[in-house]
């Protein structure tokens, strides 16, 4: 290991490395330099491992760019600034470590680098080391994915599967976060609020994107976020890209009483032996992934409606003043109705052989549409991405 020492006012550059030791040492520890400059090792095959030691505070941009033999990077105790993925096109990077006394960054048990925020070690994903594998499941605690987090190398040295769990917390995906990777489809979670332009740049095999209808509407309305669907988001794919908008089914939590022909029964205990307004129940569906829930307190619509506090999913339609409206819209009409975070528990609904109505705590509510129980993705849009 060759130690390279510099002055705090000097930004570490390629020349500092070229002139160290016998010249271009493969394994180095850098001390004293306040900043590590962008693109220091640009298309350099000779660098293998780097320790950012005492005094190094800022790692700017991508000091490692197309360094095929880089395997190990250590983040020292004083590093406090890394604003994006620092190793782009580095297919052999397998090990990222962080000094135990560092208060700003953390590495999980897979070796992925995170930025600590508000005491959460797994809040913002910063750098994916491609040498650890080609499949990635995003942890539930992650809210942000930094720019250039997982900028792939080639189809054989990049991610071929990225999974967001149904109850994922991810809100933002940065520029080029998953550029140049090999997956054929991706399903965005309910929690997503912003997808940066070029987040999936040059994902040549990406053919299908699934995104929640209400999320797509929100992103489209937000002038600061990318419009979905958008050419820029998936720029560089080589064929027609299908964007499918999906809907979470309308549901109630366990313990919600439903009026049936046999009496009042909790929704999760209903079966095909029960009937609602003369119609047989085909099945009771279960769903997860609902990030929010609508709270409808007793008497909030009118006297004895509902007859007790009731909760349901945002999209569930409820009869109010002569029309069926989504529960999410009741808040603007009834002051006591409000939205809150859902606890992640399973929600249930009733499927009849037709789109019908049922009574829940004196609320007239819709049952599932038969088509939505068997078809998750209700509308398909296509766009022709640019080739840039």
Image (cartoon, rainbow, N blue to C red):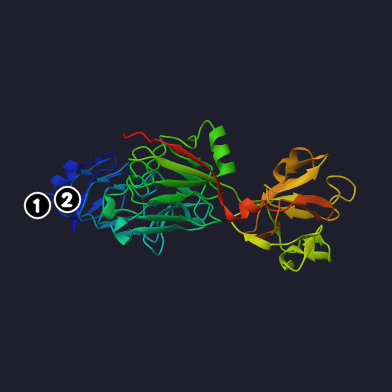
Name the spot of residue 7 as percent of width and height, x first: 25, 43
Q: Which residue is painted at 74% across and 66% down in the image?
A: 270
Dot 1: element: loop
Q: Is 255 in front, or is 206?
A: 206
Q: Is residue 375 left or right of residue 308?
A: left
Answer whether residue 52 is visible to the viewer in this image.
Answer: no
Which of the two discs, 1 and 2, labels the residue nearer the N terminus?
1
Name the spot of residue 225 as percent of width and height, x first: 50, 35
**What is the tally of numbered marks visible in this picture?**
2
Answer whether residue 270 is visible to the viewer in this image.
Answer: yes
Residue 176 image label: none
Q: Is residue 208 left or right of residue 189?
A: left
Dot 2: element: loop
Q: Which residue is painted at 83% across and 63% down in the image?
A: 261
Q: Quadrant of residue 42?
A: top left
On-image quarter of the C terminus = top left
Residue 22 image label: 1
Residue 45 image label: 2
Q: Is 93 in front, or is 284?
A: 284
């Amino acid at each position: 290991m060759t130690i390279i020492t510099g002055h705090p006012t000097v930004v570490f550059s390629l020349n500092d490395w070229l002139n160290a030791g016998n010249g271009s040492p493969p394994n180095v520890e850098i001390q004293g330099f306040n900043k590590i400059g962008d693109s220091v090792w640009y298309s350099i095959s000779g660098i293998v491992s780097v320790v950012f030691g005492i005094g190094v505070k800022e790692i700017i941009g991508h000091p490692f760019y197309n360094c095929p033999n880089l395997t190990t990077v250590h983040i020292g105790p004083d590093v406090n600034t890394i604003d994006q993925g620092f190793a782009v096109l580095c297919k052999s990077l397998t090990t990222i470590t962080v000094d135990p006394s560092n208060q700003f960054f953390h590495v999980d048990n897979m070796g992925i680098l995170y930025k600590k925020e508000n005491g959460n070690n797994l809040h913002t994903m910063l750098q994916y080391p491609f040498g650890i594998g080609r499949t990635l499941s995003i942890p539930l605690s992650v809210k942000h994915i930094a720019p250039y987090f997982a900028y792939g190398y080639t189809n054989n040295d990049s991610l071929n599967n990225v999974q967001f769990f149904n109850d994922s917390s991810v809100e933002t995906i940065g520029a080029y976060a998953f550029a140049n990777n090999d997956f054929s489809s991706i399903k965005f979670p309910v929690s997503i609020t912003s997808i940066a332009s070029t987040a999936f740049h040059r994902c040549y095999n990406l053919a299908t994107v699934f995104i929640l209808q209400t999320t797509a509407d929100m992103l489209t309305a937000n002038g600061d976020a990318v419009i979905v669907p958008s050419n820029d988001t998936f720029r560089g794919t080589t064929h027609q890209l299908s964007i499918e908008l999906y809907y979470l089914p309308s549901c109630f939590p366990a313990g919600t009483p439903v009026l049936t022909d046999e009496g009042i029964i909790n929704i999760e205990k209903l079966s095909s032996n029960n009937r609602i307004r003369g119609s047989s129940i085909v099945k009771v569906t279960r769903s997860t992934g609902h990030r929010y829930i609508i709270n409808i307190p007793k008497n909030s619509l009118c006297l004895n409606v509902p007859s007790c506090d009731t909760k349901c999913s945002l999209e569930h339609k409820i009869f109010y003043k002569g029309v069926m409206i989504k529960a999410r819209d009741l808040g603007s009409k009834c002051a006591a109705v409000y939205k809150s975070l859902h606890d992640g528990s399973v929600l249930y609904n009733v499927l009849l052989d037709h789109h019908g109505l049922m009574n829940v705590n004196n609320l007239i509510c819709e049952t599932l549409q038969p088509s939505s129980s068997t078809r998750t993705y209700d509308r398909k849009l296509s766009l022709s991405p640019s080739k840039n």
